[in-house]
Amino acid sequence: MSTARTSTAITLSVWKALLLREAVSRLSTGRAAWVWLLVEPLIHVGFMLFLFSTIRMRTVGGIETAVWLMVGMMAFLMFRRTGTQCQNAVGLNKGLFTYRQVKPVDTVLVRGTLEGFLTLIISIILFAGAAMFGVNMIPADPLAVLEAFFGLWLLGAGFGLIASVGAELIPEMGKVVGFIMMPMYLASGVIFPITNLPPLYREWLMLNPVAHGVEAARLGFAPYYHAVPELSIGYMYGFAIIMVFIGLALHVKYALRLKAK
């Protein structure tokens, strides 16, 4: 005698299957695809460390330059990689929508979860590698660091949910998103200390919720870090939750159009 599965059981089964599919695809597309996950942040950090060593800046905000750069870079990548992968999820999984159990939002959520997990693992590997070379990469408050990284992942997921709908309904949206990522990179204080700016300009930049996550991650590594006075972890989470709800609402509203595109 067979029993009908509940909608929750069906959704969990779909997510499990999608997660395994995405993991295999993400780590085996092309030769040594997984190596690029490590190489990209290493190139960024190495180049910026070269610049900072050239101008002989050994500390930023009271902490080592290497720690400041690496933590800020990986924190921002948690947002950017999650948002970018979520944005492309619908377009790359069109063939799966012939199965009525698979919804466009499922592919976005699963892809974002996988990317967040991979970025966290890569961060741990890079931090451990830097510690082996004598850099003090042991966080003073690991829970605060995880709180900041999770908030940035939530921001990326919310951003990706919205962008995934926009990219399918408005083809030019993908180019716009790619264009704004570089200004976002600069405005989030990843490669320059926002604390050095005049208060008026600093307050404007701190309207960017990603900057709060980046600063919070650094503060979790070193409590004596001179973070910006406007830092608010609650602001980042509030912004992220609103974006997630907007993204989910858009997916509900345009679900049929996303499947049919």
Image (cartoon, rainbow, N blue to C red):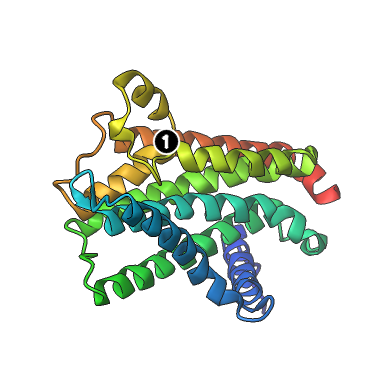
Residue situated in front as seen by the camera: 147 or 8: 147
Q: Is residue 252 visible?
A: no
Indicate the position of residue 148 as horizontal and vertical percent values: 33, 49
* Residue 100 picture location, percent across and down: 77, 59
Q: Quick one: which residue is furthest to the left in this view?
A: 224
Q: Nearer the viewer, residue 199 or 162?
A: 199
Whether residue 259 is visible to the viewer of this picture, yes or no, is yes
The residue sitting at 42% across, 63% down in the picture is 46
Residue 79 is left or right of residue 213, and the answer is: right
> Where is residue 231 shown, x and y percent of the image?
28, 34
Image quarter hosting the N terminus: bottom right
Q: Quadrant of residue 137?
A: bottom left
Picture mark count = 1
Q: Amino acid at mark 1?
A: Pro
- Residue at x 58%, y 55% (from the top left corner): 109
Residue 128 relative to residue 37: left or right: left
* Side (left or right) of 104 relative to 210: right
The structure residue drawn at horizontal position 27% and vertical position 50%, both measured from the top left corner, is 57
Image location (x, y in percent) of residue 242:
49, 33
Residue at 46% from the left image edge and 47% from the top image edge: 154
